[in-house]
Image: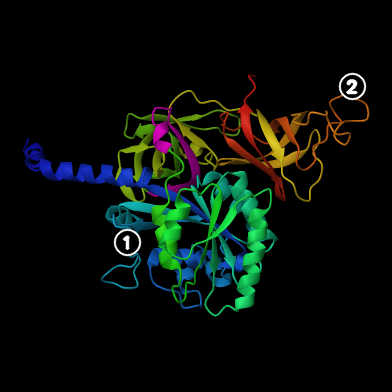
Amino acid sequence: NGSQKTNDSTPSTQISKKLETTSISETLSSRNIRVAVVGNVDAGKSTLIGTLTSSSLDDGRGRSRTSIMKHRHEIESGRTSTATTHLMGFRHTGEPIAGRDSIRANKRKSEDEIARESYRIVTLIDLAGHEKYLKTTIHGVSSGMADYGLVLVNSRHPPTHMTQHHLNLCCSFGIPLIVVFTKTDGCPVHALKNSKEEVCKLLRAPDVGKKPFMVRNEQDVATCIGKMNSLAPIIETSCVNGEGLGLLRKILFALPKRRRHEKKLNRPFEFLVEDIFNVPGVGSVVSGFVNAGELSVGSTSTVYVGPTDDGTFLTTVAKSAHISRINTGHISSGQSACLGLSLKKDDRSKLRRGMVVLKDSPTSTREFDAEICVLKGEGTTIRKSYQAYVHILNVRQSAYARHIEIVNTNPLGLPPSHAAQNDDDDEGIVLRPGSRAKVRFEFAKRPEYIRSGMRMLFRDGRVRGVGIVTGIPLT
């Protein structure tokens, strides 16, 4: 009884604690913009993120970059190879929250401190720029649920083919772009002018189709915010002397949220697994993104995790949940969270990335139908039994094209290049760059959980085409 009394004597503190966590979870779902940062190898993506989150300028020798990098080989070579996320907080007024601790200058604030202090949060997703890591970058863009994309261009060199790929990647996922020219301090005028002209050419090209718009003051920010789907704002920044960073922060604060995850609350719970950890004393922990619905964790909340390699789901209990290192009992759609699962030893090894955690009626499938469009660009033809690597949200696996049917948008009938020599079989349909088709894909290795309506992207080496999952055949 005594313990009960002490608990009841301070209801106000409990209520304030509860209010604090609900407001934080609201900040982290409805007032949280996710921004993917892409660009060529030398564009300075990690440096820009390090400078924005720690709010202290770079020294031109990689100080900001090393403070946010994850692996030792990244710090040594200076190349990012994994997709990482970093929080940047704003107050009501739009003034950024300093990422450095006010007392100990060299200690960075942890995610939960930033989340507690801020009214509005921008999650910056740092992606790899090197061509070798292109598949990591594609997976980061497809599963990162980005609201906007920051395309960084080194102002001293004209954009490369990787910049072109990244622009195509954002456009094929329908992500609005902001172009940032980095390293403008000490940049020769003609080099900057040349880079700008090249980027404007890329942006005006028919497969991107954005109008470049130079942002030079705050009025320009207000102008371009409402027209983000047709304009591509261009900002010149430098992380060494801080030029243009204020404008970039203003734009990031003013950007409206594009994905409305709050509307998906009444859907069944769906959690996309991004990463898996084994925490001593806790057990298996999966981190990822709540795509739909809501879940209250505890000893009674039974969830299904899967699909495993044979297409079945593991039944388990979601014991606890964290949102950016803050313990919480309830997670809802639009948040990045971690779930602690109570799994047996032999079930732990079955966990992998690309799984989902569901509340009810789990299904898995080997085949799916999609309506695809092959991107223009250098490319091979696609015919039956073509194998590609498919990205659907957080699922990535190679798949075969089982059956192809061309969606004919041309009133004159098919051009002769598409049809087979003899029309009576299905074998000879060929897809060339620019053509649209309905394709039945089959996964090569294991069944996955997919719903119709999910965006897909397929590639073999480079990005080949995009599409939408239209249906799952009933087996």
Q: Quadrant of residue 285?
A: top left
**Observer-nearest of 217 and 323:** 217
Which quarter of the rendered picture does the N terminus lie within? top left
**Contact, mark 2 vs mark 1 (Cβ under 8 Å):** no
Kindly report the distance in space between the C-alpha atoms of the residues bearing marks 2 and 1: 67 Å
Q: Is residue 350 left or right of residue 96?
A: right
Residue at figure coordinates x 67%, y 64% from the top left: 198
Read off the residue under disc 1: 95
Read off the residue under disc 2: 424
Residue at figure coordinates x 23%, y 46% from the top left: 20
Q: Position of residue 447 (x, y in %)?
A: 62, 31
> Counting residues from the N terminus, which is met first, the one under dot 2 or under dot 1?
1
Q: Position of residue 17 (x, y in %)?
A: 20, 45
- Please say whether residue 273 is one of the residues in the magenta stretch: yes
Give the number of the mark in front: 2 or 1: 1
**Amino acid type at image mark 2:** Asp
Q: Quadrant of residue 261?
A: top left
- Please say whether residue 452 is one of the residues in the magenta stretch: no
What mark, if any, has residue 466 been given in the picture?
none
- Seen from this angle, which residue lies furthest top? 474
- What kind of element bears circle 1? loop
Which quarter of the rendered picture does the C terminus lie within? top right
**Amino acid type at image mark 1:** Glu
Q: Is residue 229 above or below residue 420?
A: below
Q: Is residue 126 above or below residue 207?
A: below
Q: Position of residue 79 (x, y in %)?
A: 58, 66
Neighbours of disc 2 within 10 Å: few (<14), some (14-19), many (20+): few
**Observer-nearest of 439 and 263:** 263
Q: Which residues are magenta?
A: 261-280
- What kind of element bears circle 2? loop
